[in-house]
Amino acid sequence: MATMADVARSAGVSVATVSHVLNDTRPVLPHTRRAVLDAVEELGYTPNTLARSLVTSRTRSIGLAVSAISNPYFTEILQGVEAAALEHGYSLLIADPHDDPAHERKVVQLLHERRVEGMIVAPSAQPRALLAYLGRHRVPAVFLDRLVDMPEDDAGPRFDQVCAESTEPTARLVTHLSGLGHRRIALVAGRPGLSTTAERIAGYRHGLAASGLPYDERLLVHGHSESAGAERATTALLSLGSRPTALVTANNAMTIGALRALRTHGLSVPGDIALCCFDDFAWADLFTPRLTAIAQPSRDLGARAVRVLLDRLAEPDRPARTERLPCAFVHRASCGCPDGPERTEQPESPDLPTEGTPS
């Protein structure tokens, strides 16, 4: 196995110069850098990353803590994070907090103890312990997908946040269904306490108001962001004396649960009940009928979170920022429109109240 000394002899430079090139610890002339890199390639030299981290105090690693990694939405986010991290020379350590505040705090500490340089976290509905740990240890972190409300009078550190738009796209689904003649439109919402849940409920209510429809609290149920929970919630909707004629599901896992409940009750989509969902996924166009959905820019979210984290590492004292990425409306047939070529377009929702964004 080649050593750093072998690389230095082959390139005709000192071991210290090889170290500076590989660790980027001091400027090196371009032709010298090229000679070192060519020698590394020719000899097949593999740097000892552990030893390098001890010398430089840098591990070139990022911690990622997201729940339900098996969910296609988070899987695509993971792909975006990994690709962007590798592009910038960082490795990735992954942990699943299971949406449990105590476990979330534990896995974040474990990632921190492994000396990651920063973290990307999809926080739970109760992130107090998470915020306390990150703040106490001054861990550079970006909150992904789910925003955390940090009051302006809070003297603690501020954190960067990256998410997709939720309110306007959800309103678009509701107004689309109302435009097809539906007057009893239900929402299967996610886990209470999550910003995504609150924003999609707000979008649902804005969509009803824009359509001139009254809000009926019986038509808003919580599936707790899980398939089984959505199946139970949808079953409750179907037991109403005047059941809904259209359904909006607030994430892809809950879409599966809702479809399972509809099948159990012998109901067809869209013949008996129309369906629109938040979150598109790879096989949504393989269902019969194909699913009308809001598509989030999952990979772009992951990549953007990495770039925001790297900006934070480069400028630790810069002001925190919240970035929102737009979603797309993917028009298929489960809403009750005639089946035809798939159309993808940016949402054109009605005028909605402007709401403050955590920062």
Image (cartoon, rainbow, N blue to C red):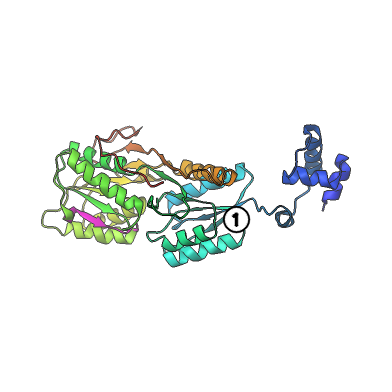
**What residue is rendered at 13% in x and 46% in y?**
214
Q: Check disc 1 and report the residue beneath it.
A: 116
Q: Is residue 357 left or right of residue 108?
A: left
Left or right: residue 126 compared with residue 48:
left
In this orientation, which residue lies closer to the viewer: 199 or 40?
Answer: 199
- Residue furthest left as drawn: 241
115 or 263: nearer the viewer: 115
The amino acid beneath tag 1 is: Val
Position of 148 relative to 293 (above/below): below
Q: Quadrant of residue 353?
A: top left
Q: Give the class, few, some or many, for how many residues have Cα within 10 Å of label 1's Cα (few <14, many ≥20).
A: many
Q: Is residue 99 visible?
A: no
Give x and y (percent) for residue 33: 78, 37
| Residues rendered magenta in the picture | 218-226
Based on the picture, tell me whether residue 238 belongs to the magenta stretch: no
Is 179 placed left or right of 259 in the picture?
left
Tag 1, which secondary structure?
loop
